[in-house]
Image (cartoon, rainbow, N blue to C red):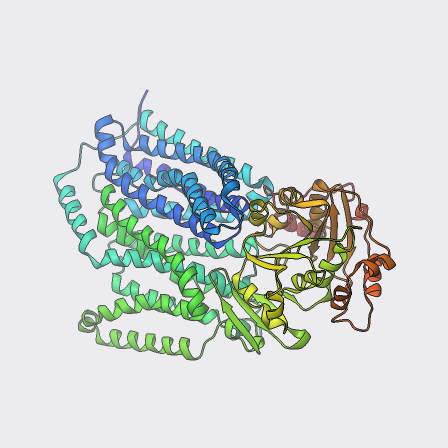
Amino acid sequence: MKTNLNRHSYYPILFLLFLISGFCGLLYQIVWLRLAFSSFGIITPVLSVIVSIFMLGLAVGSLAGGKYIKALTGRSGLPAIVFYALAEFFIGVGGLMVPKLFAFGQTILLPAGNFDSFRYLAFSAFILGSSILPWCICMGATVPFMMAFIKELNRDDIKGFSYLYLANVIGAMFGTIITAGFLIELLGFNRTLLVAAFSNFFIAAVSIGLAFFRKYPAAGGITANTKTRAAETHAAVKFSPYSAILFMTGFVSMAMEVVWTRAFTPVLQTTIYAFASILAVYLLATWIGSWRYREQAAVRHAMGIPRLMAFLSFFSFLPVIFSDPIVWRMTCIHNFKVSQAIFTLASIFPFCAALGYLTPKLVDDLSQGNPKSAGRVYAINILGCILGPLCAGYLLLPTLGVKFSLISLSIPFAGYLIYEIKKIWAKNRRYALSTTTALSILLIISIFLLSSYEESPAYRPGVVRRDYVATVISCGKGMEKRLLVNGIGMTNLTTITKIMAHVPLSVRDKKPESALIICFGMGTTFRSALTWGIKTTAVELVPSVRDAFGFYFSDADEILKNPNGMIVVDDGRRFLRRTSEKFDLITIDPPPPVEASGSGLLYSKEFYDVLKTRLKDGGILAQWYPGGEEKILKAVAKSIQASFPYVRAFRSIEGWGFHFFASMQPFDMPKIATFVRRVPIAAGEDLVEWTPEKSPAELYGMILERELPLEKILTPDVTFSVTDDRPFNEYFLVRRLSYGLQNRKK
């Protein structure tokens, strides 16, 4: 039996449903992106496709949902919330289907060719798109569907979009924090998807209950006044400059997020939590800005567009200021013990809060609560969100660098103020003069006085290279040369990287014929392997890292002309899946730190399962582990042991880090005399190039002395390992918080 429910009593329920929906949306984006990386490679095109398809689906769903919801409710006689329930149900189905679709697509791509990158990328984009687009369209449709239901409850509600936007943003913020901070570490990716899918099913069930078990005032159609407002809105969508502002805010905000990530990496580091913190602050600020707009709109005191654009003009320069290393240091002097990370994250807060105020205001003003109009104008904003990251990643950052990318993205807001300056001058000359003067000063300071880590004096003499993946800095002289990627030190000139080639190549009785180096770095291991006179392939994800080879070695040009050598720009796992070649040695030197985002894909059992199929009989895996948390060392060892029956572990000659050697066949480390006999003359000379006071025999003897029995690492309590589903090394917040609490109790 249906019961009466005041129409305003529905609003808290709808708010909660949309909050949960926003939570699920961000959860899906985080998990789907990681699953795509494991299936198709940690490469920028995969990231671009996932983000673009996600946003494209939202735009298409927003447009289509707004266009057809009236016809759907009219023909069926059902309330709009029924169609909202169906959309949420299909989103939940998609959450369960996407991993299977990715796995199926990966199988289809295996015959796509070894090095035909264009064909592979085209097929990858098609499979990624077809796997997630339908469910993203459903996500986009939820906004106009729920807006239509709000209109059925209250014809005069013209702020429905901002109400739902606020709920969605709050849910998205909690989705980011809870998913990255807790769920994935505790449940793994697949079970985390189950949480989201069943949350969508719960939303669908509650929505159906609201439709059929409650009685609410019938909409009775759209009034003439509403039709007039809608017609005016459609004209506004086509001709109003506010539509251009909506596009611009979407474009700039998403482009800035890409630039912030690269600009702040030296401070926030490369862990999952660093990226999640940027997104969480972005969403928290958007939430507060949206809430403030709703509060002021309720009393008809919402800020005007020119004032908001002025705020955005000023606030957009804060990240430029806080990307300067000198400012980082100033935040921690004297009695101010606030970490650089907090100041850095705080610099984006005002800008995001202003955007959180502006975006729902514009959509409310343009749509007047009409679902069709809201779908159109919101799609304009999302279109900007699609193009912004592509422009930032492929155009601005490679050509302009961090500082000038941020400045160029700030200019559109100042441009709007210039466009409106006559009107502002006519109303308030003092305000117009002070605003333009302050902006001019900010611009001059940013261009001529501020810098980013790319121009830091600490990296001189050096060379800065930029591409769509990263900013690569090569700096230093002699043996003090360093390689930094996005301001994070990757490696230096060390004999450890020579040992990664020479020791495992000496293990087999049979002379080796081929080697594969995953993670090129400075190129030391690649250069060392070539001294054995064998075919040597190196795989590197960042093009500029490959291009920096000549900075570190004066003989780089000669080495690159060696017919035995080849450097491939690709993801290591993707390369292994695509190639049919087998190798005597595969050596892996993952980027530090061991907790780096995405690094789990180079330590996981699934990765080793793929890798061992590319080893010849008796072939050796040489896995470098740079050091870190003891439990992560144990988890990595457990993963290697789960794939290889024969494993040996050694501490490095410099006292930090570990070499793991593994094979599918039994192997013994050669005696010192045997090692010396097997190593070619050129290889022996290369091994001691930086330690002329020691002989090859002495260096190898130091390695043998540092063997660490595997049973000392894999104690009986080690039940955890690194897998694709649960990357133990990357997600560590819960266990470290738990460990800290236990120590406090003691």
Examine the rendered structure and indicate whether residue 569 appears above or below residue 601. Answer: below
- x and y percentages locating residue 176 in the rendered image: 48, 48
Q: Splitting the image into 4 quarters, where does residue 351 fall?
A: bottom left
Residue at the extreme front of the image, as rendered: 563
Q: In the rendered view, does 48 fall on the left or right side of 711?
A: left
Nearer to me, 36 or 159:
36
Q: In the rendered view, does 261 fall on the left or right side of 647?
A: left
Please state the total of marks drawn on the protein image.
0
Nearer to me, 335 or 186:
186
- x and y percentages locating residue 448 in the rendered image: 42, 79
- x and y percentages locating residue 620 in the rendered image: 72, 49
Q: In the rendered view, does 413 fall on the left or right side of 610?
A: left
Tell me which residue sits at (29%, 49%) in the image.
378
Nearer to me, 148 or 114:
114
- x and y percentages locating residue 694 in the rendered image: 82, 70
Tell me which residue sits at (47%, 50%) in the image.
46
Tell me which residue sits at (17%, 34%) in the image.
221
Examine the rendered structure and indicate whether residue 416 appears above or below residue 581. Answer: below
Camera sees residue 298: no
Q: Quadrant of the N terminus?
A: top left
Q: Splitting the image into 4 quarters, where does residue 527 fall?
A: bottom right
Camera sees residue 312: yes
Q: In the rendered view, does 399 fall on the left or right side of 455?
A: left
